[in-house]
């Protein structure tokens, strides 16, 4: 069975937000059209406590987009974003969430970031999504949302590792693009076995 996985279409990742993805809101009409075509729709929501360790403001002398060493590896430091309960953490008002059956919140532990819908950034703490998908006999995931080079990529890579078939809808994702990271993300995703599709192939 198929599911649409809508990643982090939240105000803070859209134009005017704290960590805006250029033109991030432009994919929303396509995502809304796709939602109607899937029996199972799942969303993720970046959901950080104030003072989260992925925020540059939590590290003396660091600026957004600097990196730091965390116990689990190198971490990009971000502007404060998607703080629990804030407007920035809300889904974009144009996103139709009515058909979403599961919302996976991630990044809620202060000391660890979580880009992926499956695992936190230590690559071992699970969100429980694999078990949910298996229990519902879902084996094919269609990934859309923000950002191509971070949460989409990490979700796709982990989904493949977990044994799911992954399709990335190329006109329904957008990236932050730090030094060519969008192109690199596509190379990594395709190299790991993800398939690129366009929304036209999925819509009537
Ligand atoms: C994301 C950076 C930090 C994303 C989330 O949704 O791609 N990127 N938190
Ligand atoms: Zn985040």
Image: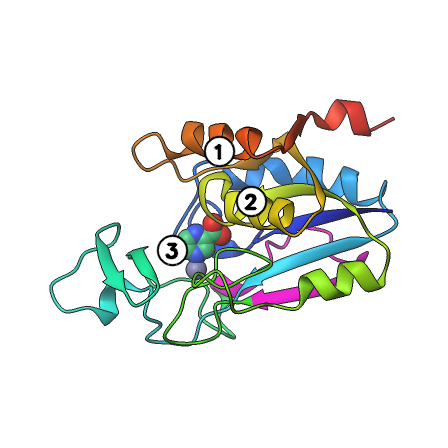
Disc 1 and disc 2 in contact, CB within 8 angstroms: yes
Q: Nearer the viewer, mark 3 or mark 1?
A: 1
Q: Which residues are magenta?
A: 88-105
203 displayed left or right of 116: right
Return the mark for residue 18.
Answer: 3
Residue marked by disc 1: 188
Judged from the image, the secondary structure of the residue bearing numbered disc 3 is loop
Taking depth in this image into account, of 89 and 186 the one nearest to the observer is 186
Count of numbered marks = 3
Residue ID for mark 2: 157
Vertical order, 16 against 51 (above or below): above
Left or right: where 90 falls relative to 4: left
Task: Check residue 92 for magenta coloring.
Answer: yes
Residue 94 shows in the view: no
Q: Kindly report the distance in space between the C-alpha atoms of the residues bearing marks 3 and 1.
A: 27 Å
Q: Please tell me which of labels 3 and 2 falls first in the chain.
A: 3
Q: How is the image coloured?
A: rainbow
């Amino acid at each position: 069975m198929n599911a649409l996985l809508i990643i982090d279409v939240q105000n803070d990742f859209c134009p005017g937000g704290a960590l805006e993805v250029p033109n991030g809101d432009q994919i929303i009409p396509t995502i809304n059209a796709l939602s109607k075509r899937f029996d199972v729709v799942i969303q993720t929501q970046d959901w950080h406590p104030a003072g989260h360790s992925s925020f540059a403001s939590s590290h003396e002398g660091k600026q957004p987009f600097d990196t730091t060493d965390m116990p689990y590896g190198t971490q990009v430091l971000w502007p404060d974003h998607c703080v629990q309960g804030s407007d920035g953490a809300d889904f974009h008002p144009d996103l139709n969430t009515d058909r979403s059956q599961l919302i996976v919140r991630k990044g809620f532990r202060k000391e660890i970031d979580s880009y992926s819908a499956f695992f936190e950034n230590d690559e071992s703490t699970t969100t429980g999504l694999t078990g949910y998908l298996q229990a519902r006999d879902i084996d094919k995931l269609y990934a859309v949302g923000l950002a191509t080079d971070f949460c989409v990529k990490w979700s796709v890579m982990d989904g493949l590792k977990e044994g799911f078939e992954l399709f990335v809808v190329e006109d329904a994702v957008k990236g932050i693009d730090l030094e060519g990271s969008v192109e690199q993300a596509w190379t990594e995703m395709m190299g790991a076995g993800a398939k690129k599709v366009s929304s036209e192939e999925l819509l009537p």
